[in-house]
Amino acid sequence: MNFRAFGEPYPGEAAKPVYARSSTLAYAKKALSCFMLRITVQWDPIRKKGIPTRSELVNKVIKTVKRFDVRRQGVQSAARRPIEYEEFVNLLTLVRAAQGKGALKYVVSSVLTLQLHMITRVHDMMQLKFEIFSPNVQHPRSLLCQLRWSKNISEERDAPEQILLARLDPCVCY
């Protein structure tokens, strides 16, 4: 674990984990543990027998790396981030330029564009039905849409109607 986090088997006091975060180490520990046959056997540091992932040293390394993670002194998080507008336009350009895909490129492009407008997840978009769209009587150049199956919706009042407006940018309109 030390080598994976610090790049050396016996790091000094001033060493910082520059190769792995605590979550990576915890997952590696879990992945190793699933291959151990006798899961109830504790690690014996004297005889060096048992399950090594139950070692106090392994847990101490993970705890130390977690401290660095909290202080933002270790490896930067590779967690998800919002997509940038330029990235989205590049994605649409790639999808629309797909050769030999027939109508599929138009379907994918439309789903992605509508996802941008509705600010929703892809799996929510896959449940769309034509019936959820209705004309907006108050604003004739817009549509009303209601997503009722999203992850955080448990009551009807949690799913208000959303107004769908056209964009003046032809890159993200279809």
Image (tube, rainbow, N blue to C red):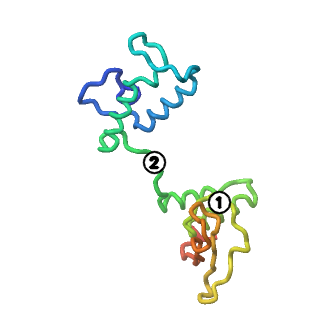
Secondary-structure class at tag 2: loop
Instruction: For marks 2 and 1, give the one nearer the viewer.
Output: 2
In-front residue for pair 101/134: 134
Q: Which residue is mark 2?
A: 79
Instruction: Name the residue furthest front.
Output: 40
> Residue 22's image quarter?
top left
145 in relation to 110, above or below: below
Q: Where does the image place residue 8, in percent across and percent down from the top left?
A: 34, 23
In this rendering, would 54 be left or right of 112?
Answer: left
The dot on residue 22 is none
Instruction: Name the residue furthest left.
Output: 14
Residue appearing at x 44%, y 45% in the figure: 78
Q: Earlier in the sequence, mark 2 or mark 1?
A: 2
Residue appearing at x 53%, y 60% in the figure: 88
In this rendering, would 114 be left or right of 66?
Answer: right
Q: Where does the image place residue 126, in percent across and percent down from the top left?
A: 68, 60
Q: Which residue is mark 1?
A: 96
